[in-house]
Amino acid sequence: MTMKNKAGTHFGRKVELDGYVFDSQKEADFYQRFIKNSGYQFEVHPRFVLEEATMMTAITYAPDFVVYDRNGHILHVYDVKSSLDGRYGVDTTAKLRFNLFQRKFKKAVEAVVPRKNDFKMRIYGLRKNVNTRQISPKGKVQFYDIMQNIDYDPAKIFNWR
């Protein structure tokens, strides 16, 4: 079931599925295809405090999905996007929140773009680019990896901790 957003927002329509409210159809599709039947425990839109409130309001971040390994430790922090760059991609504010999250919780946020049979995944906020270099047909260079499922440990495949 889709629900309307407030006027003037650039986000997709809200989608309700399995008792969760997703911010877009892409997010709901990612949940259905990769998260729901993965066998891992997960949370949808959990809220993390990145900077406590003092004289200013707190800085918080709610990733789309947090997936936990068999021991209950965070394995993946996913943020579903329409693209990895451009108008509907990862903006400066999102990159800042990803960076603050990684600094505080020692886990990188994985920006993902769902496709028909897989998803593009990119990690932002590290000093060294860990993703694979890809060149588009137009010659544009991007860094991302193509994943078939969520059964991987980013720290192991990218050789960092």
Image (cartoon, grey):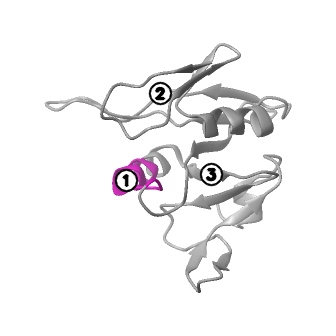
Q: Nearer the viewer, residue 147 or 138?
A: 138
Mark yes or no: residue 69 visible.
Answer: no
- Mark 3 or 2: the one toward you: 3
- Mark 1 or 3: the one toward you: 3
Residue type beneath disc 1 = Leu
Judged left or right of residue 71, residue 88 is: left
Q: Position of residue 161 (x, y in %)?
A: 64, 59
Query: Helix, strand or loop at disc 1?
Result: helix
Q: Earlier in the sequence, mark 3 or mark 2?
A: 2
Give the residue number, with chain letter if any, for mark 2. Answer: 47
Per the rendered image, the range of residues in magenta is 88-100
Which SS type dominates the magenta stretch? helix
- What is the quadrant of the N terminus in the image? top right
Give the residue number, with chain letter if any, for mark 3. Answer: 112
Residue type beneath disc 2 = Arg
As for residue 94 lying within the magenta part, the answer is: yes
Q: Position of residue 157 (x, y in %)?
A: 77, 63
Q: Position of residue 152 (x, y in %)?
A: 80, 52
Residue displayed at 68% across by 74% down: 132
Judged left or right of residue 30, residue 47 is: left
What number of labels is visible? 3
Q: Marks 1 and 2, Cα distance to the nearest angstrom?
A: 16 Å
- Label 3 near label 1: C-beta < 8 Å? no
As for residue 87 lying within the magenta part, the answer is: no
Q: Earlier in the sequence, mark 1 or mark 3?
A: 1
Query: Helix, strand or loop at disc 3?
Result: strand
- Label 2 near label 3: C-beta < 8 Å? no
Residue displayed at 38% across by 41% down: 10
Residue 61 vertical placement versus 108 (above, below): above
Q: Marks 1 and 3, Cα distance to the nearest angstrom?
A: 17 Å
Q: Earlier in the sequence, mark 1 or mark 2?
A: 2
Q: Residues within 10 Å of mark 3 (few under 14, many from 20)?
A: many
